[in-house]
Image: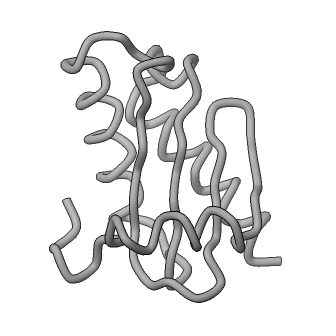
């Protein structure tokens, strides 16, 4: 988990989503907000109905993000297929997605 200071606030979400640049891969969509600072992972009920599964996905993504070089702010939206991915697969896919962003 990221510390509370590093997380994106709820108040910043609407502007971050409307003004941010969007990127996607097979299992993840990413928004890079222009003005906001912070990190967030959003797993909706459409992705995983059970809260246990949603939290598992979120923990895997957050841990993978902690090991990668990150931009100043990022919002990650896992897709449905992300629930069947292992931690290593999540880490590799996020790394390739973030490398495309930094170019």
Q: Residue furthest right?
A: 103
Q: Nearer the viewer, residue 58 or 44?
A: 44
Image coloring type: one colour
Q: Position of residue 41 (x, y in %)?
A: 40, 50
49 is higher (above) or lower (below) than 93: above
Tell me the quarter of the image containing the C terminus.
bottom right
15 relative to 91 in the view: left or right: right
Q: How many marks?
A: 0
Q: Position of residue 8 (x, y in %)?
A: 36, 71
**Picture residue at 40% right of the left edge, 68% below the top:** 39
14 is higher (above) or lower (below) than 47: below
89 relative to 31 in the view: left or right: left
Q: Position of residue 55 (x, y in %)?
A: 24, 31
Q: Nearer the viewer, residue 12 or 50?
A: 12
Rendering quarter of residue 80: top right
Q: Nearer the viewer, residue 89 or 72?
A: 72
75 is higher (above) or lower (below) than 39: above
84 is higher (above) or lower (below) than 75: above
Q: Position of residue 64 (x, y in %)?
A: 39, 52
Tell me the quarter of the image containing the N terminus.
bottom left
21 relative to 3 in the view: left or right: right
**Picture residue at 54% right of the left edge, 64% below the top:** 14
Q: Nearer the viewer, residue 48 or 27?
A: 48
**Picture residue at 47% right of the left edge, 65% below the top:** 13
């Amino acid at each position: 988990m990221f510390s509370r200071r590093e997380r994106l606030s709820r108040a910043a979400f609407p502007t971050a989503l409307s003004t941010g640049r969007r990127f996607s891969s097979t299992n993840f969509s990413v928004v890079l907000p222009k003005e906001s600072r912070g990190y967030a992972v959003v797993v909706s009920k459409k992705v995983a109905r059970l809260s246990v599964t949603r939290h598992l996905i979120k923990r895997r993504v957050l841990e993978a993000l902690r090991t990668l070089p990150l931009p100043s702010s990022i919002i990650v939206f896992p897709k449905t297929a992300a629930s069947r991915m292992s931690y290593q697969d999540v880490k590799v896919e996020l790394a390739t997605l973030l490398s495309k962003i930094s170019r």
